[in-house]
Amino acid sequence: MANESKNLPIVKAEDLKNADHDDYAWDYLFNFTDKYFEMISNDPQVLRDFNDSQLVLLAYNYLYGELVNGGFIQLINNRNAYAFESPFPEIMQSWGAVKTVEIVDKAKVIFEKHKEELLRDKTEAEFSELYKKITDFEPLEEEFYQCMDEETKIIKKYVKEHVNDFATVV
């Protein structure tokens, strides 16, 4: 798998150093994802040139944010279910985020079972009703909440060790 990108953002080494503490891994990771979002807002087509590492880090950002705010149903409803697709699970596994991959794999089975209903256009009331109808995701969300901080630290460690796959550091 080629991991080259034409679009590596520039990140300051000093900013990475200042964000490199054990309290909150996202302080470090936001140095990358914030730059990605800035690039995307300037040109949405730039995503085509992102490498797999950049895309998976973005997908993890969406996964984390959506699960914390509204669970798998919200993730799917907002069309952010890239975590169910290759290469996300394979790359996350190689980064060491094994628990996240296990949870996503289980969620994918539930997603496939309810795919038609989850993906169809719906009103806000119909969307809210999904939480009552499809409760299979709830134990997986709880499992994610239990491991998300540790998994994010694992991802941060990988990003630090492979920083040149994510950005150009100056």
Image: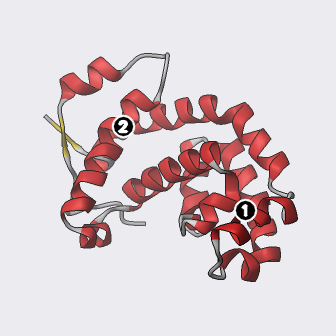
Which amino acid does the dot numbered 1 rest on?
A: Ser
Residue at horizontal 79 percent and vertical 59 percent from the top: 131
What residue is shown with label 1? 128
Between the residue at mark 2 and the residue at mark 1, the CA separation in whole angstroms equals 30 Å
Question: Viewer-proximal residue, 116 or 48?
Answer: 116
Farthest residue to the left: give it.
170
Q: Where is residue 106 in the image (x, y as percent from the top left)?
A: 79, 58
Residue at horizontal 60 percent and vertical 41 percent from the top: 96
In the shown orientation, is residue 90 left or right of residue 158?
right
Instruction: Give the class, few, some or many, for how many residues have Cα within 10 Å of label 1's Cα (few <14, many ≥20).
Output: few
Disc 2 secondary structure class? helix
Instruction: Give the class, few, some or many, for how many residues have Cα within 10 Å of label 2's Cα (few <14, many ≥20).
Output: some
Question: Viewer-proximal residue, 111 or 159?
Answer: 111
Q: Where is residue 5 in the image (x, y as percent from the top left)?
A: 26, 61
Asked whether the beta carbons under mark 2 and mark 1 sit within 8 Å of each other, the answer is no
Q: Position of residue 145 (x, y in %)?
A: 71, 36
Which amino acid does the dot numbered 2 rest on?
A: Phe
In the shown orientation, is residue 48 left or right of residue 154?
left
Q: Position of residue 86 (x, y in %)?
A: 57, 69
In the image, is residue 84 above or below residue 162?
Answer: below
Q: In terms of sequence position, does the residue under pointer 2 or pointer 1 come before the other?
A: 2
Quarter of the image that includes the C terminus: top left
In the image, is residue 70 above or below residue 155?
Answer: below
Disc 1 secondary structure class? helix
Residue at horizontal 69 percent and vertical 57 percent from the top: 72
What residue is shown with label 2? 30
In the shown orientation, is residue 158 left or right of residue 140?
left
Q: Nearer the viewer, mark 2 or mark 1?
A: 1
In the image, is residue 12 above or below residue 69?
Answer: above
Farthest residue to the front: give it.
125
Using the image, tell me which numbered label, if any, was put on residue 3. none
Residue at horizontal 24 percent and vertical 60 percent from the top: 41
